[in-house]
Image: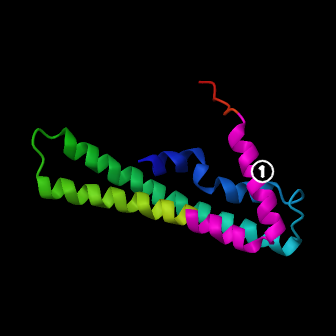
Amino acid sequence: MASAQSARRGGGLAEARLVERSAKRLELDEKTVAAVKKLVADATAEEKKISEKLREESGKLREMLDEALPEEAALMKQAETVNGLSLDLQKLQLGTTLGVRKLLTPEQRTELMEMRKNMRQQPRRRRQP
């Protein structure tokens, strides 16, 4: 369920959102900025739908596991449903990342890769409870 956790943290669309926030640094024209914003908005809406369904189906799986002896076939089918939704979420995130990258010039992609590298090297900030 790492994908569901990633979605809750916003990590799945992080690169697309980074491009959106860094339009000036990447020297994006207005047409590209608009296309990136549309990709992010569409993906965010779809991500929300998939994540909600994933939470619902994961809850059903937990309920089944709370039974003393759940039916194996039904349990395995529910596990496949949950895993399928996780895969759908990951595919959406990857597709959005690639979609945004396709909008960029080779120079902009190089700059984006450098930005990502620098972000990974920075210590993560922890949220205060």
Identify the residue shown where x is 86% and y is 67%: 28
Residue 18: x and y in percent read: 74, 54
| Magenta span dominant secondary structure | helix
Q: Amino acid at mark 1?
A: Met
Say which of 45 and 110 sits in front. 110
Task: Read off the magenta span.
Answer: 94-122
> Can I make out residue 42 in this image?
no
Relative to 78, is 84 on the left or the right?
A: right
The count of marks equals 1
Residue 96: x and y in percent read: 62, 66
Classify mark 1: residues with Cα within 10 Å, few (<14), some (14-19) or many (20+).
some
> Can I make out residue 11 in this image?
yes
Magenta highlight on residue 53: no
- Looking at the rendering, in which quadrant would you find the C terminus? top right
Say which of 52 and 94 sits in front. 94
Relative to 32, is 97 on the left or the right?
A: left
How is the model colour-coded?
Answer: rainbow
Say which of 65 and 52 sits in front. 65
Relative to 46, is 16 on the left or the right?
A: right
Q: Which residue is mark 1?
A: 115
Magenta highlight on residue 104: yes
Which of the 4 image quadrants contains residue 127? top right
Identify the residue shown where x is 27% and y is 55%: 79
Residue 102: x and y in percent read: 71, 73
Relative to 17, is 77 on the left or the right?
A: left
Identify the residue shown where x is 28% and y is 50%: 60
Task: Give the secondary structure at mark 1.
Answer: helix
Identify the residue shown where x is 66% and y is 34%: 124
Residue 123: x and y in percent read: 69, 32
